Image (cartoon, rainbow, N blue to C red):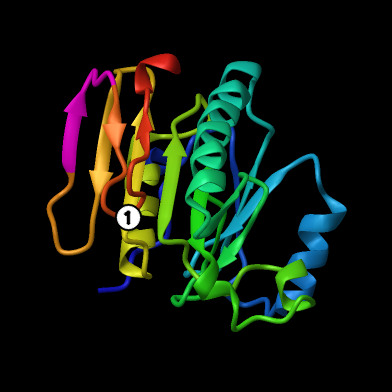
Amino acid sequence: MARLPLTREEVSCQKLVLKLEKVDLTEEQIFQLCSDNRDFDMELTAQKELIIMPPVGLNSAWRENILTTRLTNWAEKDGTGIVCSPSALFKLENGAFRGPDASWIPKEKLKVFTKEELEKFGHLCPDFVAEIRSPRDTLKELQEKMAEYIANGAQLGWLIDPYKPAVYIYRPGEPVKRLDNPTSISGDPVLPGFVFNVAEIC
């Protein structure tokens, strides 16, 4: 069932949503739009809603960096995939352009793309995605985003809410699992051996 357009309650007041369903932007134009406005984060929903977001605050940027750093340290030892920062945008199968706060992609998935293609949007969904809630996010919009990642191919998703604190774990074909105030979370089996110390950022 197609999702209805975003409502005011579903989107933080810090974000601007532009409805572009009648504007036929090419992928190259979307890439240029993002490149020309680097002070803002942008995403495009499957319903052609352009979401323009201000930069995150200092604490949120620190949390994102901690997660991507710990994930990168693990990935370098594991050697089977790469980690992308929040600045990466992925075009999902449903047509949305999304940028998770942290993501991991198996190197095997990247072999089908040329070097030139890899300099633009990723035409895939990472196997692992993570979102860390910041003051600019509502929990509902992040939960919908996580469900979208799973529906488009992600094998594991973490939604970390440092304000509760709680972690929501997403896997294909399984109900969402909520962990309240966890000390750590495991990435097995998608990220074998990776354990993230959630308490470090909550």
According to the picture, the residue beneath numbered tag 1 turns out to be 190
Magenta extent: 177-183
For label 1, the crowd category at 10 Å Cα-Cα, with few meaning under 14, some 14 to 19 and many 20 or more, is some
Q: Nearer the viewer, residue 136 or 66?
A: 66
Q: With 3 as the anchor, is 121 left or right in this view? A: right
Up-down: is 193 above or below 42? above
**Is 178 contained in the magenta span?**
yes
> Which residue is drawn at the image coordinates 44% and 31% (left, top)?
133
| Viewport quadrant of the N terminus | bottom left
Q: From this viewpoint, which residue is outermost toward the right?
A: 36
Residue 80 pos. (x, y %): 49, 60
- Identify which residue, 184 or 178, lies in the foreground: 184
Name the kind of residue labelled 1 in the image.
Val
Residue 202 visible: no
**Which quarter of the figure is the C terminus placed in?**
top left
Q: Is residue 69 left or right of residue 174?
A: right
